[in-house]
Amino acid sequence: MDTVFLGLANLELDCDEIDLGCGFYLRKTYAHLMSHGMVAFAPAPPKGHHPAPWKATQSGYAYDIMAELVMPTKIRDLRFTQEDLSQIMVGLLRLSVKPDIVAPLISTHDLSEAKQDDNAVFHALEALPRFFPLAIAGKEKVTADDLGWLSHELSTTLAFLHKNPKLKTALEVLSDVQFVMHRGMAMISIWAALESLFNIQHELTFKVSAYVAAFLKPAGVARHELFAECKKLYGARSGAAHANAHAEPDDLLRSVMILREVLVKLIESRKVPDAKSLELMLFGDNSQLKEGNAGK
């Protein structure tokens, strides 16, 4: 099996198919995935079913799948598993187009044909609720232009993520943050991803705040304001980690946006700055963002 089909909810295309490159395609389709709990009231006999009556619970989940990602199971020269590729592509779609995309289903067959093929195999994937749902107001159908950032040199992006496991992990953290039940744990994971990206192991509050601000903003007032904001947000993260404090929704949302901005800039620059480059940026040398001047 060289191709699998990832069913996507909360994604409606304005055309039948969009080529993303590297063997990935987005296509219009339709499937409805549903799962509702059932309750039986007597034990099952040996090798038998629980006897009636059965009653349906009021909980469960259901998704209207409006698009599918046609996906190769492996990419030449990149040691990604099928699971890796699924996580990365869904993460990139959420990062670049719609953060509320959900991937509840994976199939061995094209969903438009699977209903007529007894050999089709389905597996449920993202079945958890989104405890901290993100969305872009007013965003409805997705166009090929919307996907331009993702499809532009996708092979280079995948190779960059393969070469930088910390970047891949940070993308997964951002992609999965909506499914974390406890906001404090989500806050901790976001800032842990930023610490890891910039290889920060001591003087955590100052360095992560200073490096993020230096990486995202030019020297001046805007950089200092972001530095102060990051210190505040990292303090909220520390409260969640050490004092069992509840993370405020606005603090978590802002932390998510900061990590998103860092990831977009890293992917666009195709460089992960090393400690020396970050220190030079901190003191106003933004030439470190130019090609060849930062750690890879």
Image: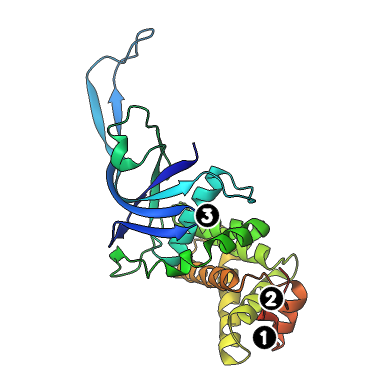
Q: Which residue is mark 2?
A: 206
Residue beneath disc 3: 88
The residue under label 1 is: 286
Task: Give the distance between the C-alpha atoms of the residues marked 1 and 3, in whole angstroms.
Answer: 29 Å
Residue 260 in sight here: yes
Q: In this view of the protein, which residue sits in the foreground, 28 or 139?
A: 28
Name the spot of residue 208 as percent of width and height, x first. 66, 72
Which tag, 1 or 3, sits closer to the chain's start? 3
Q: Is residue 5 above or below residue 231?
A: above
Instruction: Name the element at disc 3.
Output: helix
From mark 1 to mark 2, how far is it between C-alphas?
Answer: 19 Å
Residue at the outermost top position: 46
Q: Nearer the viewer, residue 203 or 160?
A: 160
Q: Give residue 106's quadrant in the image.
A: top left
User: Which amino acid lies under the numbered mark 2 shown in the image of this protein?
Assistant: Phe
Q: Earlier in the sequence, mark 2 or mark 3?
A: 3
